[in-house]
């Protein structure tokens, strides 16, 4: 199954997450199919904390990719920011 999930990056104590499409069997930070955006929980001031390519997200959900619960929450948050 194909899933949309977070892949952790950044350094210790300063997390940064890529929102990726990956096979469910591959480890969290391993190989992925496509990068859809990013989430930076420690963004300050005018820094962008969340970006998702909505057109690619629509495509992947259309072909059956399942989003993780955290990514679902971030998608709703991005939609709220865009409105």
Image (cartoon, rainbow, N blue to C red):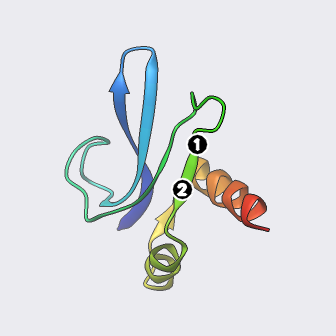
Question: Where does the image place residue 73, in percent across and percent down from the top left?
Answer: 67, 52
Q: Is residue 78 or residue 65 the one in the foreground?
A: 78
Say above or below: 63 vs 38: below
Residue 66 at what x, y percent from top left? 49, 67
Task: Residue at 45% x, 27% y: name it.
Answer: 15
Q: Which of 63 and 51 is in front in this view?
A: 51
What residue sits 67% from the left and 59% below the top? 78
Nearer to us in this view, 81 or 36: 81
Q: Position of residue 69 (x, y in %)?
A: 60, 51
Q: Dot 2 surroundings within 10 Å: few (below 14), some, or many (20 or more)?
A: some
- Which image quarter is the N terminus in? bottom left
Q: Judge from the rendering whether residue 38 lies leftward or rightward of residue 41; answer left or right.
A: left
Residue 29, quarter of picture = top left
> Residue 48, how many percent across, how many down?
57, 45
User: CA gap, disc 1 to disc 2?
Assistant: 7 Å
- Left or right, 56 with respect to 21, comes to right
| As drawn, 29 above or below 13 | below
Which part of the image, by quadrant, shows the C terminus?
bottom right
Identify the residue under disc 1.
Answer: 49
Label disc, if present, on residue 51 of the rendered structure: 2
Q: Viewed as shown, does residue 36 lie left or right of 40?
A: left
Identify the disc placed on residue 10.
none
């Amino acid at each position: 199954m194909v899933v949309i999930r977070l892949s952790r990056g950044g350094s210790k104590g300063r997390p940064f997450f890529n929102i990726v499409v990956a096979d469910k069997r591959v480890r969290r930070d391993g190989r992925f199919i496509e990068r859809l955006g990013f989430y930076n929980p420690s963004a300050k001031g005018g820094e962008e904390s969340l970006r998702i390519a909505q057109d690619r997200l629509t495509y992947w959900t259309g072909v059956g990719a399942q989003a993780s619960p955290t990514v679902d929450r971030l998608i709703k948050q991005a939609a709220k920011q865009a409105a």
